[in-house]
Amino acid sequence: MDISKRAKQIQESPIRKLATYANETKKRGIQIYHLNIGQPDIPTPEVFYNRVKDFSEKVLSYGPSDGLDELKQAMVDYFLKYNIALNKNDIIITTGGSEAVSFAFNVIADPEDEVIIPEPFYTNYNGYSSISNLKIVPITTDPENGYHLPDISEFEKKITKKTKAIMICSPNNPTGTVLYEREIRELGKLVKKHNLFLIADEVYKEFTYDGEKHFSILQLQGLEDHAIVVDSISKRYSACGARIGAIISKNREVMKAILKFAQARLCPPTLEQIGAIGAYRLPLNYFKAITDEYQKRRDILVEILTSNKEIILKKPNGAFYIMTKLPIDDSDKFARWMLEDFEIDNETVMVAPGAGFYSTPGKGTQEIRIAYVLETKKLERAGNILLKAIEKYNSLNP
Amino acid sequence: MDISKRAKQIQESPIRKLATYANETKKRGIQIYHLNIGQPDIPTPEVFYNRVKDFSEKVLSYGPSDGLDELKQAMVDYFLKYNIALNKNDIIITTGGSEAVSFAFNVIADPEDEVIIPEPFYTNYNGYSSISNLKIVPITTDPENGYHLPDISEFEKKITKKTKAIMICSPNNPTGTVLYEREIRELGKLVKKHNLFLIADEVYKEFTYDGEKHFSILQLQGLEDHAIVVDSISKRYSACGARIGAIISKNREVMKAILKFAQARLCPPTLEQIGAIGAYRLPLNYFKAITDEYQKRRDILVEILTSNKEIILKKPNGAFYIMTKLPIDDSDKFARWMLEDFEIDNETVMVAPGAGFYSTPGKGTQEIRIAYVLETKKLERAGNILLKAIEKYNSLNP
């Protein structure tokens, strides 16, 4: 009696797999600065909690499989503020962005089909590709080039009869890169030419800096039948534990099929949807203070890290991640070493090793992902500890 | 650009597919008694809501992928009251029982693998088998026999090289049948002999009547590596909208792999887990008044329906469903007709047609599932309307 191949094959979360070592570190009385996980420290909006507290129905009953109508309306209104005109039936509320990824994969592809994704990419795409038996075909991007896309011809070369979609994430997790409108338009043309879907994970939409603006695939005219957007409130409203996301498409056949997937799991969690309605009704200036804060953090971190000239880091314009190539032999080893054998004044730093974000074997071994989800003082301290860790590590492994 | 085969193939919820007609019925001013959906009318325990309201963390952050430790402890304590000894690491909290079904299928089977399930069965198993590309191999049970299992040899005949598991649901949705301990023990022996998993959906555990007791596969000694239980608070604590379930197994390899699936979707909803902790800490006598009420309802409904001698109905001992074979030509047509062309004093009844609960084509066409989730007076009225509808329908379709 054996477990399935997909169960054996599925990748362990590279973000969470060092957790066991971290627990030991804490037991030794050492404080860890967690730069490894994208858990924002921004308070969840009060209106979210207040709405949940005001919920007064006697029975917490099943909601609609496609989500609460009022939440869908609040999302329609919110997107309109970005000049994106949606109808309620273009939206299905999901249990987190994760479920939206799962729905997207299952609706476009059967086992053995292929999805082209620029790497490094968010590790959960790997998880869902294993579960759904898809093959991710990576297009490697380069830290020296700020992880922007290579020439569109590189994508075209990878298209086979099995290719069903190209998937992007912008602003990007793990790199923080915001794709140029030009890059997205070229992808739009390519998927149209080859009759593919274009899936975009746009959950970090608001988090852009230096005046950079996020360009949504929903803004591409003539691409309505191809575009599928993965969305979530987790980062937008600092409500990761709520598990409220959405899948958005104007392709009726796609949405009809996704509704059937949604019916299989009955409905998304009700109370957290109620909270999300309040969050979505916040004015857009709610994001101003938050993005200002993140931009400040990014600047501090980039300044510290680039003081070491051997660190390769192009300042990214979005999300709250930095992916950087360090002058070390192996970031897996390095990250574990920082937890097990390193401390300064009883403090150390936890980062996510880069290899887990690549699907090409051997790639990303010198890179790490840093989430700048700590307040500036702590971040400054964490950045400096990291710099010293690199020095010390290399002096021990010359 | 085409959607996937699994998206085309997945069954529309037979419970929810008549919803469009029902909306039209309501627009015509006709009241519908909803016997079609297993949405209990029992109030969600106050302690559930109170705990949610007391949640005071500033950030609704990611929880552990395997669920909140306190909830797992509360479940361990709860199971101990049934003399089932679990450890916290035998439990992974899921987003509803649905996700537990999905995890169970994905951990035991790859595309094209087979799972043997007695039919009629809960329709969502169909949904997840399509999504995961499994093949459900049905064993047909019989209304005349109260939907109990046929001889164990019938199961053995269906076992092939592709068979990975046998799956049962007791107390059963849609039939209300509680499997005898003997039936479960025989299945236990069979899966052991053929090295298969035994998956049991036990979400209706508390809902047994006439002194009948639920027998869990977790009570089968020597079957620890084979047994996987799907669990949920939806019906237990009338919290269907919470989406809190669990998957339970003592097989370490299974649980380790499921944890990786769980990491891909990050965590179950936090607030509803907080509420569930309170519910699980209720004393077992909490269920007494509820099961008394359901038993009363079942008795009323069975009495009314069996007054028509052509209706085949063996009084079931569990859950809050009745599956019954009516003297009609086609229950799909009949259910729709009740919504579109029938009313008594501006009232009608909505039921779930039986065919959707079978995977063998042509089966269940005379059967319907009734959920007795209405208070006794309404249920009595609904039962009598249903009886009259059968008469009228047959007089029009002789």
Image: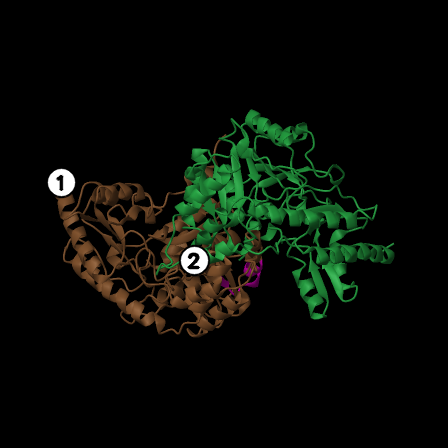
Chain colours: A green, B brown
The answer to which image quadrant residue A139 occupies is: top right
| Residue behind mark 2 | B242
Q: Are marks 2 and 1 on the same chain?
A: yes
Q: Mark number for residue B396?
A: 1
* Segment colored magenta: B247-256
Under mark 1, the amino acid is: Leu
Q: What element carries label 2?
A: helix
Name which residue lies at 40% across and 58% down. A55
Question: Looking at this view, is B355 or B388 the one in front?
Answer: B388
Q: Mark number for residue B211?
A: none
In the rendered view, tell whether residue B1 sits above or below residue A144: above
Name which residue lies at 50% across and 61% down. B93
Give residue B341's position: percent from left, percent from top.
Answer: 19, 41
Under mark 2, the amino acid is: Ala
> Does residue B217 belong to the magenta stretch?
no
Give residue B302's position: percent from left, percent from top.
Answer: 20, 60
CA gap, disc 2 and disc 1: 44 Å
**Mark 2 Cα-neighbour bin, 10 Å: few <14, some 14–19, many ≥20:** many
